[in-house]
Amino acid sequence: MDATAKPIKPALVVEPEVQRPTRAEAEAAVKTLIAWAGDNPEREGLLDTPKRVVKAYEELYEGYRQNAHEILSRTFDEVGGYDDIVFVRDIPFFSHCEHHMVPFVGKAHIAYLPTEGVVGLSKLARVTDVFARRLQTQETLTAQIIDAINDALNPRGAAVMLEAEHMCMSMRGIKKHGASTITQRFTGVFAEETAEQQRFFSLLNMQKS
Ligand SMILES: Nc1nc2c(ncn2[C@@H]2O[C@H](COP(=O)(O)OP(=O)(O)OP(=O)(O)O)[C@@H](O)[C@H]2O)c(=O)[nH]1
Ligand SMILES: [Zn+2]
């Protein structure tokens, strides 16, 4: 390998390294799971369910076919020299835990300090979805979002906080409805300077007008 080549970060790997089964194989697997749950996959109400589930999976897991770097590649320089904090909070997301394939649902709060122009605000929400629409842990999701922002925008600092409820803890297992999990990661000046970190928290807690 060329010693200067930049290694691909796992966060930016788009395609899983597995052979994708055919749609028919995926539908057959759903049929098996219906029977495993205890129902009859041949009864009328369930006949089209494998098709619908596979179609839903295409949407729920579309992040595997998307590229965060591409989404963040379009930046705007004409922002009147603005170089202070850009903070988008309360971005709703849905993901699925990689242990049980059950949803976890919550909000992302994302901030960065621009250096080379700013990115469209919606792109921060899109990047959240690129990684949320995969099988995840909340920790990995947090790390992948901030890695993608750092990689694409080279900001002076970035901060990502996620708060979510995991249905695998509410609907099954320990059954603790309402428990929320918070994960956060700071890089650059948000990691190095307490004052910047405090600014993140005060904006996070600021009353909405
Ligand atoms: N750290 C972390 N754990 C998670 C996440 N999503 C689910 N889990 C946990 O993953 C763990 C899997 O534990 P296991 O003991 O292997 O599986 P299990 O027998 O189904 O566990 P229980 O949920 O306790 O019934 C559970 O404790 C879940 O709460 C996540 O995003 N991050
Ligand atoms: Zn789980």
Image: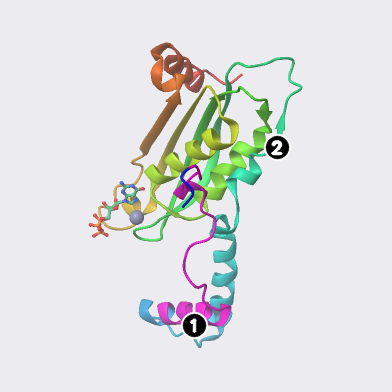
Q: Residues within 10 Å of mark 2 (few under 14, many from 20)?
A: some
Residue pictured at 49% horizontal, 23% vertical? 204
In the drawing, does residue 116 fall left or right of residue 26? Answer: right
Q: Secondary structure at mark 1?
A: helix
Q: Position of residue 102 (x, y in %)?
A: 41, 58
Q: Residue farthest to the top?
A: 195
Residue pictured at 56% horizontal, 47% vertical? 129
Q: Could you say which is closer to the camera, residue 160 or residue 20?
A: 20
Is 149 in the magenta?
no
Q: Which mark is drawn over residue 3?
A: none
Distance Cα–Cα, label 1 vs label 2: 41 Å
Q: Secondary structure at mark 2?
A: loop
Q: Could you say which is closer to the camera, residue 204 or residue 133?
A: 133
Q: Residue farthest to the right?
A: 78
Q: In the picture shown, does residue 188 fall above or below 52?
A: above
In the drawing, does residue 4 fall left or right of residue 184? Answer: right
Q: Residues within 10 Å of mark 1 (few under 14, many from 20)?
A: some
In the drawing, does residue 9 fall left or right of residue 71? Answer: left
Report which residue position mark 1 lands on. Answer: 28
Q: Residue farthest to the bottom?
A: 42
Residue pictured at 58% horizontal, 43% vertical? 127
Q: Position of residue 46 (x, y in %)?
A: 53, 80
Please give the range of residues in magenta: 4-33
Q: Which mark is drawn over residue 74?
A: 2
